[in-house]
């Protein structure tokens, strides 16, 4: 099974990763947070390629080229808005599962995720981390081509939360 790592950093600067995951909005347009950072770094070609793929639904994932980013692809996931899109945990898990399955289908060996839905969409960070990491741990065995999954977190607190959650889930699997 591939390795999972949690790092603090900029999702738009993961040059050693095949695909980065965008915390997309339904229209796949630039916005704040992760979507804004990735669209700014990728340039206008990303928005042009996204236009015919929109709208997407919560839990859905679509793949595009990376344009000006240092990666091969961007996988766009629409996470649930907490308290609005239900069942939130199933929709959030579907984002991670669908992104991994797209990466596997397209022969990608590495993927980097942000903390989907944990920002403007209001998902409680600890619960979002648990759903994300548990889903990746469950899905990775079915994606033998994926060698590395990286969670790229915005700040030290989020990074530490994800690392603690990963360690707890892995020790529970043993």
Image (cartoon, rainbow, N blue to C red):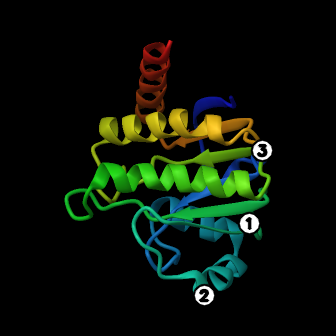
Percent across and percent down for residue 19 are 70, 54
Q: Is 27 displayed left or right of 103 in the figure?
A: left
**Can residue 119 be seen by looking at this rendering?**
no
From the image, tell me which residue sits under label 2.
Answer: 52
Q: Residue at 51% across / 50% down in the picture? A: 96
Percent across and percent down for residue 72 are 79, 60
Q: Residue at 32% across / 35% down in the picture? A: 126
Near mark 1 (Cα within 10 A), the count class, few <14, some 14-19 or many ≥20, is many
Nearest to the observer: residue 34 or residue 124: 124
Position of the N terminus, as image quadrant, is top right
Q: Is residue 91 above or below residue 53?
A: above
Percent across and percent down for residue 65 are 75, 69
Q: Are marks 2 and 1 in contact (CB under 8 Å)?
A: no
From the image, tell me which residue sits under label 1.
Answer: 66
Picture disc at residue 111: none
Nearest to the observer: residue 22 or residue 69: 22
**Which quadrant of the figure has residue 74?**
bottom right
Pick whichever of labels 3 and 2 is earlier in the sequence: 2
Instruction: Identify the residue at the far left of this view.
Output: 83
From the image, tell me which residue sits under label 3.
Answer: 109
Q: CA distance from mark 2 to mark 1?
A: 16 Å
Q: CA distance from mark 3 to mark 2?
A: 27 Å
Pick whichever of labels 2 and 1 is earlier in the sequence: 2
Q: Is residue 172 above or below residue 82?
A: above
Near mark 3 (Cα within 10 A), the count class, few <14, some 14-19 or many ≥20, is some
Instruction: Identify the residue at the far front of this view.
Output: 142
């Amino acid at each position: 099974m591939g390795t999972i790592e949690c790092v603090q950093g900029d999702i738009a600067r993961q040059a050693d990763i095949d695909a980065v995951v965008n915390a997309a909005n339904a229209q796949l347009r630039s916005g704040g947070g992760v979507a804004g950072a990735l669209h700014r770094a990728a340039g206008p070609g990303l928005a042009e390629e996204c236009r015919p793929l929109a709208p997407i639904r919560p839990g859905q994932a679509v793949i595009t080229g990376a344009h000006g980013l240092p990666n091969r692809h961007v996988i766009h996931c629409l996470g649930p808005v907490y308290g609005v899109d239900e069942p939130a945990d199933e929709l959030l898990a579907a984002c991670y599962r669908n992104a991994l399955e797209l990466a596997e289908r397209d022969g990608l060996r590495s993927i980097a995720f942000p903390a989907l839905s944990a920002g403007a969409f209001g998902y409680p960070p600890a619960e979002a981390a648990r759903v994300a990491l548990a889903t990746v741990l469950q899905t990775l065995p079915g994606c033998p081509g994926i060698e590395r999954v990286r969670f790229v977190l915005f700040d030290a607190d989020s990074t530490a939360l994800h690392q603690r959650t990963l360690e707890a889930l892995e020790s529970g699997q043993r």
